[in-house]
Amino acid sequence: MIKLVNVSKYYHNEGIVSLGLRKINLEFNIGEFVAITGESGSGKSTLLNVISGIDTYEEGELYINGEETSHFDDDDWEEYRKNTVAFIFQNYNLIDSYTVLRNVEVALVNQGYDFKTRREKAKEILSRVGLHKHFKHRASKLSGGEKQRLAIARALAKDSEIIVADEPTGNLDSESGKQVLALLHEVARDKVVLIVTHNYEQAANYVSRKVRLFDGEVVEDKEVRTFIPQEPEEKIYQKMSELKKSSIISFYNFFGQPKKSILMLLVSLATVLFVFLLYGSLLNVDDYVTTPGVSLEGYGNFYKERMIVIRKDQEPLTDEDYNKLGKNKKIRSIIKEDSVVDINFLLVDDSLKKFSYMGGNLGFLFDYDEANLLGRLPEKEGEILICTYVMEDDILLMKSFLDKEYNFQLSSYRKNYDFNISFNKNYKLVGVYNTPVYPSKFVISEEEIKEVYNYLRCEGGNYELSFKGEKYTGGINFLKVLYDPSLTGNQVKSLQLNDFLINDLSFELFWEDQKLDIIKNDNYDKFNDLYVSPELFEKMVPLVYNQYTLNLYKASDARSVLDFLYDNGYYGFSPNLSGYAYGFGMDYILTKIINFVILGFSIFVIYLLSYLIFKAILNSKVHDYTILRIIGFQKSNIRQIIFLEILTSFIFAYILFSISYQYIRIKYPVMDIYELQDYLFIGLINLFLGVFITLKFIRYQKKRSLFSTLRVEG
Ligand code: ADP
Ligand code: MG
């Protein structure tokens, strides 16, 4: 079975060569129970280590079942250790966190047995070593003798031809020692059992042979009693993939050490959470507006201090809302006529030759430098100020353009409208704010804002009048209703009425139940417009405010104001925060690039941090991993086990987070900024983090020798 021919082993330590074994010639066969004795330092452990493939030898040849081993590489030795040798240590090397049953089952996993067979076999073997009362006990709770019997049970479960035991009775009282020896004696009937012992007298009654070493040499080798040679049994290997074996073990570990698993879960959760928030805050602010079920009227003006507010119940805003919002100290002003903020002004008049093209949104001059102001701010209806850059040389010329009227085209720029409204208006240019910072901005007074709102408040409306006449009765539709201050009472004017009906004096025109007075006119040019008196206008187009624009003092208050709004029954939207996606050009791309760099860097830092914690947790498990290797699991199994343990906690954390996030999402729609692809992307980042942490830990572990810790103890 095992044959050593002139085997020598030297230890090289810092230039000093010491002898481990010298020209050993021994042969062991199935059925033998051999006691190896000798003084401390005589080479007993070294001999066992060489025989069991834990240690190498320098000279001679070790034959296993007739096969030379001097050409064995690491994989061959792994295979040999996995299938042929089982170890029993003086300090037992059990997995303390497992139950007695599981300590045996773990060896059976490596044999490839299914769950049921593992249970049955483990119970059978444990009964054989007298531990049937302790199946469910933790290994750490057993007495020394019981632990050693459990170690033997585990060795038996491995079903190897060779069992080596380095001072298995060293830690036991004599009664337990005897039990262990008796057990090994029984086991030795169909195996080779080699035990190192200090106390030969105790073993003498059981062993079949005694080998004594001195200074690395065999000085005595005698048969104590005859043994019956046995043929090695044909081993039947069960088929189970290595990955499945690793999964079973990582499952055992995950639930066997709940505290560590929970800690790993928490670290993973923190990592997942961090990545989620980071990703959201850097890359996905643009989706604020896509809250399901919330319909914003839209916006096209993106200045930083702007915030749009609607009520959660999506009803029009009232004076009460206005007062409530006005109390917030971070809000500088409230523009009820929100849609005016999105008006696009275009200077049409080309009498301003030098500045002939100018277009842009409505703006506000909150903090302005008096020195840059040519003229003054608009104070009443019909006045306008332009923000633009005027070169030094042109300032005088520009001044000469002030206080004159110019024609502007005003067009509404709102996402949700079916049609664009645009109309022309004359304004008196009262001021120019000379700035390169925000050119193309137009400032009008509060009164003018209200005035312009009258053009917009009927946007998208559909107003139906009915008429009753001798020749015709029916309805007539107008898309827009406008007012004409020259009209009073129920007076109306329209081109449509002109062409079609006005000369037929025998009909009457109604809006709802009110009879209208048709005024003949000839200079209105819009076919779909109905001009009415101011009083009638208020009735036909009631003044409602579906959304307000708030101007904040500081753009950086946006998030806290969003929270304030949310808590007080509103949805708030910051076009600036939400607007990245609609902006293009260099700034947009640059922002994205910077965000990616920040994201990458932060993820790298969180990776290092969570690695450090994982490393500490895994280091505390290394002892168990080493024991698994001694039982016969291979390096690749250990890698898979570590990988699966880390991955399991990451996946758990990811699922846990995603589920709780769904809950938050439903409760706080404004926070709802993630879409499916974001979940997938974030999942992927976390998966990579798990993989990197595993790889890094394995690389770190590689530098440490597997058996070094146990060899000292053995
Ligand atoms: P035993 O188990 O009989 O007490 P060992 O087999 O452990 O003895 O040691 C045999 C000899 O080899 C001793 O002289 C010991 O100092 C030496 N030795 C054992 N392990 C090492 C090692 N890792 N490095 C250097 N010398 C060693
Ligand atoms: Mg020793």
Image: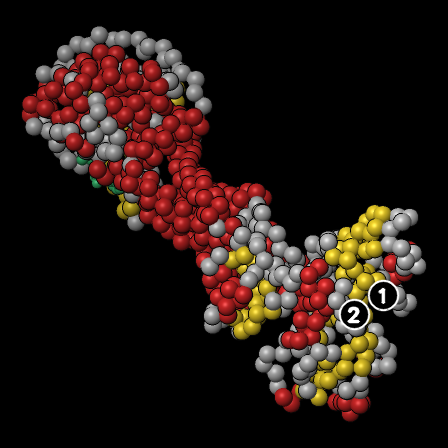
> x and y percent of residue 109 in the render?
35, 23
**Residue 173 appears left or right of 66:** left
**Residue 647 appears left or right of 530:** left
**Residues tagged 1 and 2 counted as in contact (Cβ below 8 A):** yes
Q: Amino acid at mark 1?
A: Ile
- In the rendered view of the protein, which quadrant contains the N terminus? top left
**Residue 145 appears left or right of 158:** left
Residue occupying the point 52% across, 46% down: 682
Viewer-proximal residue, 517 or 462?
517
Instruction: Work out whether mark 1 precedes mark 2 in sequence or the reverse, and give the earlier one.
Output: 2
- Can the viewer see residue 436 in this picture? no
Residue under label 1: 519
Q: Is residue 196 above or below residue 555?
A: above
Residue under label 2: 487
> x and y percent of residue 14 in the render?
30, 49
- Can the viewer see residue 115 in this picture? yes
> x and y percent of residue 72 in the render?
41, 28
Q: Amino acid at mark 2?
A: Leu
- In the rendered view of the protein, which quadrant contains the C terminus? top left
Ligand number 1: quarter of image: top left
